[in-house]
Image (cartoon, grey):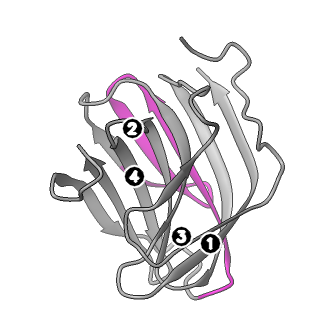
Amino acid sequence: GGSATGTCAFTGNTYHVSTPRTHFFVTCSSNASDFSNFVFEAQMQIINGDCAGLIFRANSTTGKLYLFQVCQNGAVRLYLYMDYSGNHVTTLATTSSSAVVTGLNQTNVLAVIARGKTLDFYVNKNKSMSVNDSTLTHGQIGFVASAASNPTEVIYSNTRVWTL
């Protein structure tokens, strides 16, 4: 499959994602979105808790996905999940980015650019990480609220997706 338009139904809308759990996420649309090479950008504000993130090349049936996580303390990470249990998670990259506006209620623009195995990650237009990984090649996109130690709520807005 795949999207010829490269847009999602939620473009321009605001989404509140909150969770007391670590591995909760919502996808772009039920099963309609299937992106291989794309740019995925969203503005986020962490209202409560720990971390926000974009998921991509996700399979909502199996729980396989990449998670680009950005935390209110400035931590930036890329995880590879192989199932929903959280028992099979690989940390592909971790760094701390001075581009992150830290603290609660701050606005940060996150972006993922995926081209084949080359995955580039941006915070506020600054490249934070670049990773080569070919485990997952296509799938859904979505948002995550990541509760490391505190229940977390994130607001997403100004979402844009386009295919490459």
- Rendered position, 7 above or below 106: above
Judge depth for marks 2 and 1 and give the one in front. 1
Q: Residue furthest right?
A: 12
Residue at coordinates 28% horizontally, 63% vertically from top-left?
94
Q: Is residue 124 magenta?
A: yes
Which residue has dot 3 on it?
A: 99
**Residue 106 placement, left or right of 14:** left
Mark 1 and mark 3 in contact? Answer it, CB < 8 Å.
no
Q: Is residue 1 magenta?
A: no
Sooner in the amino-acid sequence: mark 3 or mark 4: 4
Give the residues drawn in magenta, as a range: 104-129
Q: CA distance from mark 2 to mark 4?
A: 12 Å
Judge depth for marks 1 and 3 and give the one in front. 1
Residue at disc 2, secondary structure: strand
Sooner in the amino-acid sequence: mark 4 or mark 1: 4
Which residue has dot 2 on it?
A: 119
Q: Nearer the viewer, residue 68 or 96?
A: 68
Among the 4 quarters of the image, the one containing residue 58: top left
Q: CA distance from mark 3 to mark 4?
A: 19 Å
Which residue has dot 4 on it?
A: 67
Give neighbour class at mark 4: few <14, some 14-19, many 20+ (Cα, 10 Å): many
Residue at disc 3, secondary structure: loop
